[in-house]
Image (cartoon, rainbow, N blue to C red):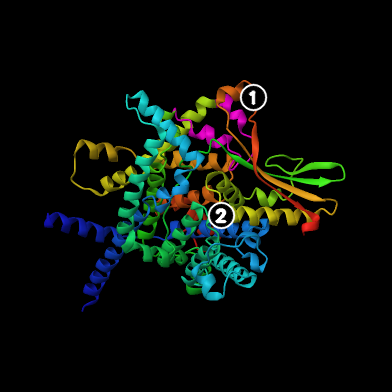
Amino acid sequence: MIARLRRVARAWIALTSEQEPPRVLALLRVAVGLVLLGSLFSAYASGVLESMWIDQRYGGALELERTTFWVEVLGGPSRTVIFGLFAAASLSAALVVLGLGGRVPYLVAAQAYDSLVRMNGDTVGSYDSMLTNALYLLFFSAANATLSVDCRLRSGSWTSERPRPAWPRYLLIFQLLVLYGATGLQKLSLTWTPLGGYSALYWVFQDPTWRRFDLSFTAFAYPLLVLGTAVTWHFEIGAPLLLLHYRALRQKGNEGRLHRWLVRWDLRKPFVLVGVCLHTGILLLLNVGPFSLISLAYYLAFLRPHELDRPWSWLRTRLGAGPG
Amino acid sequence: MTPSSTSASFAKLRAALLAFHVLAVVVLSLPGAQVARSNRWQSRLMRQDLADWAAQLEELGIRVSAEELGRTAQGIAESYVAWRSVAVAPFQAYSEVTKARQGWAMFASPQRHPYEFHVDGLTDRGWTPLYRPHDNDARFLAGYLLHNRMRKFQGRFARAMKGHYYEDFTEFVARRALEENPELRAVWLGLYGYASLSPERVRAGERPSGSYDNVRIFGREAQ
């Protein structure tokens, strides 16, 4: 037992010590920063920021039930404080996109954004947690080490190939798989299951709350929605099993049948294909804010740095850094 | 300490902290306190889900009423929440401070009795629709009311209504309508609720019909 625990600990230390060129994390940084900027400006432009996150006493629509830590510290849910946090979050998001300012912008963006959106628990989405989770992991990463202004200022080049810790990328994959597994397990309505005829997507499409346009015509394509529901629910429930594939790839000397099956194909590819189709479908048919975009940003983490060799080489040439 | 031993110690410390993070992600992603909230168990959506489950169990030879099933399930949910609060305690502060939050209940139970928020205005010609979701002839504040965060806010009215938020919200929208439309003498706001139709009924050409709840009227003189 002790020997087994030691083996597991050694493997965990080895895994968390791995290094790789930080190019994937740099792309993820840009994507997360852009989604964050989009989420902030959409709340501002639509009037949500002024009406839902500022208290009635200061011109908002509602007498808010709660406040958040930083809003409280800064003096309460007034226009000045809320717009101040909005400015801080927006500026930090822009710095995250540019890769300027080191780690501080990640911290400020996550804290300011979370403090804003949680002023009203009835306007918060899962995408908000996905954004702040990504910022937290990127804060510890070397996402600014390449394709960034920081890299340019430090080395004179826009890109750097120096290996950096890979664990933030691994944890972003893990976060996405836990998210899918947890949401799948919470789909307790019969309509998601074979017992309810896999009818959930049909009912979602009849609900005006989320659909982009009238989707009642989908009644004429009902078998497709049954298929879509079945694929979605089983995909979510089964997502954490992808970890077995990753584990099997690292196990040497194991020739068992399950191990052979798990390493025979690159199971990432069908997983990513289904996931990208799922989120593209959501993006086209339902208005759930930046949920699909931030999910697709997380999918970048499935890329291994060497899989970007050709586009990266092209990019480096364009930026005058040579093909590397 | 030599550089290599420092580096080995750092690797161990990092591995320990990351193990804590991984554990926190898993534990905090377990469904939260909302599963035991009494207003959730009394909502029409939950009653529909319980009726579905009771019917399904009856087909399997287990006779149980939806109410009885609801009481049992709520009891289990309350015990679970008590257990969860102990399990998440070591990770709660970590999540609060870092904003690395979990909680992923997305479309867990599709709404089959949706509500639409409707706004009408009274002019010299009578009542006229100002806002209907997805109606190009009634698009007052549509950019605002159809924003994804406002959709979520309005969706809550069908699930677990917060009375004071509804009062504040209707007053806010009515005030905007009266300010921006000088010809209006009054504004009418309400929730139009209906049961979504089965695919067979939609294919047969039926349209959902329902009724209005929580109607509020604001006159110009009240402003």
Q: Above or below — where is B16 with respect to A312?
A: below
Q: Secondary structure at mark 2?
A: helix
Residues packed near mark 1 inside 10 Å, few (<14), some (14 to 19) or many (20 plus): few
Q: Is residue A288 left or right of residue B211?
A: left
Question: In the rendering, which numbered label is found on residue B206?
Answer: 1
Looking at the image, the residue that sits furthest to the bottom is B1
Going 32% across and 43% down the picture, which residue do you hit?
Answer: A241
Mark 2 — residue?
Answer: A123
Going 68% across and 40% down the picture, which residue do you hit?
Answer: B134
Q: Which quadrant, please, contains the C terminus of chain A?
A: bottom left
**Is residue B21 among what the camera can see?**
no
Give amino acid for label 1: Glu
Q: Above or below — where is A77 with respect to A125?
A: below
B46, A74: nearer the viewer: B46
Magenta stretch bounds: A197-221
Residue A237 at what x, y percent from top left?
Answer: 37, 40
Residue A218 at what x, y percent from top left?
Answer: 58, 29
